[in-house]
Image (cartoon, rainbow, N blue to C red):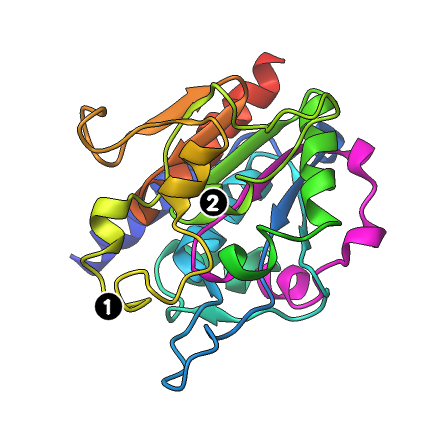
């Protein structure tokens, strides 16, 4: 049984990997430095490992170099113990080496990146969503032909990105993210009352065509529109990464 599992694991790793070609280019992952939500009970904000490490694995295993950027740089907080593909990428693909030395926005040359991804965890809603250095980076990567992707609460972090024409990046774009209907049922952020923004509300306010569970055939579907790739929940984070690669290589 154990040998069969290991064989299946090896096959899955092989299938998920493309040619390791360092000339393919670079992808930027945006992460948060915020650890708690500022309440007396210290509800954890941070970054969700399962929404960052698996996409990182998909990117690097397809030959892309990945950098991390955060508002203040350096080591960033993560929730969830590593397991599965997260454990693999930490052990074999230098995930910790990269993310524990995240870049500051001024160290990022936007012309070097073909895509930018933001995973979930509540942290990005606190310090990325309003960061005056990171939001323009996302806009510049997109306007340079790049792809933008997000999972869970990640799309809320780029809701306020404005393009050079003054319009919001998300205006008239079909996308999704962690919906209000689920947020208000969870205690993680006290039913959303600790959050600086409600993700769905902010995206709708800035013109996004937000897709709810009622709009999608399956709540884990990936939504792709105008080089923006999103999903509601963490189990689809790897699918977002794969679809982002498809969009990159299509262009």
The local crowd at label 1, few if under 14, some if 14 to 19, many if 20 or more residues have their Cα within 10 Å, is few
Residue pictured at 60% horizontal, 67% vertical: 33
Distance in Å between CA atoms under marks 2 and 1: 19 Å
Q: Secondary structure at mark 1?
A: loop
Q: Is residue 105 left or right of residue 67?
A: right
Q: Is residue 93 left or right of residue 84?
A: right
Q: Is residue 13 visible?
A: no
Residue pictured at 18% horizontal, 24% vertical: 217
Q: How many marks?
A: 2
50 vs 156, nearest the viewer: 156
Disc 1: which residue: 187
The local crowd at label 2, few if under 14, some if 14 to 19, many if 20 or more residues have their Cα within 10 Å, is many
6 vs 209, nearest the viewer: 209
Disc 2: which residue: 156
Question: Could you tell me if the residues under marks 2 and 1 are in contact, i.e. CB atoms within 8 Å?
Answer: no
Instruction: Give the quarter of the figure containing the C terminus.
Output: top right
| Numbered range of the magenta stretch | 95-123
In percent of width and height, residue 221 lies at 28, 30
Residue 78: assigned label: none
In percent of width and height, residue 237 lies at 39, 43
In percent of width and height, residue 147 lies at 60, 27
**Residue that sits furthest to the front in the current view:** 205
Q: Is residue 241 above or below residue 124?
A: above
Residue 24 found in image quarter: top right
């Amino acid at each position: 049984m154990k040998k069969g599992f290991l064989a299946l694991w090896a096959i899955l790793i092989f299938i998920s990997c493309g040619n390791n070609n360092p000339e393919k280019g670079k992808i930027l992952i945006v992460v948060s430095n915020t650890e708690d939500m500022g309440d007396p009970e210290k509800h954890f904000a941070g970054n969700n490992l399962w929404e960052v490490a698996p996409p990182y694995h998909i990117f690097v295993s397809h030959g892309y170099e990945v950098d991390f950027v955060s508002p203040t740089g350096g080591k960033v907080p993560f929730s969830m113990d590593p397991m599965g593909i997260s454990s693999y990428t930490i052990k074999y693909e230098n995930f910790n080496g990269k993310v524990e030395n995240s870049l500051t926005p001024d160290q990022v040359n936007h012309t070097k990146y073909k895509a930018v991804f933001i995973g979930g965890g509540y942290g990005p809603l606190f310090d990325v969503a309003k960061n005056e250095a990171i939001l323009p980076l996302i806009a510049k990567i997109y306007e340079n032909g790049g792809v933008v992707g997000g999972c869970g609460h990640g799309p809320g972090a780029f809701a306020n990105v404005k393009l050079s024409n003054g319009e919001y990046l998300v205006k008239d774009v079909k996308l999704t993210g962690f919906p209000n209907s689920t947020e208000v049922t969870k205690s993680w952020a006290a039913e959303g009352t600790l959050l600086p923004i409600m993700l769905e509300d902010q995206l709708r306010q800035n013109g996004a065509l937000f897709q709810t569970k009622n709009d999608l055939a399956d709540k884990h579907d990936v939504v792709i529109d105008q080089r923006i790739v999103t999903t509601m929940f963490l189990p689809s984070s790897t699918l977002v990464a794969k679809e982002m690669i498809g969009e990159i290589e299509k262009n």
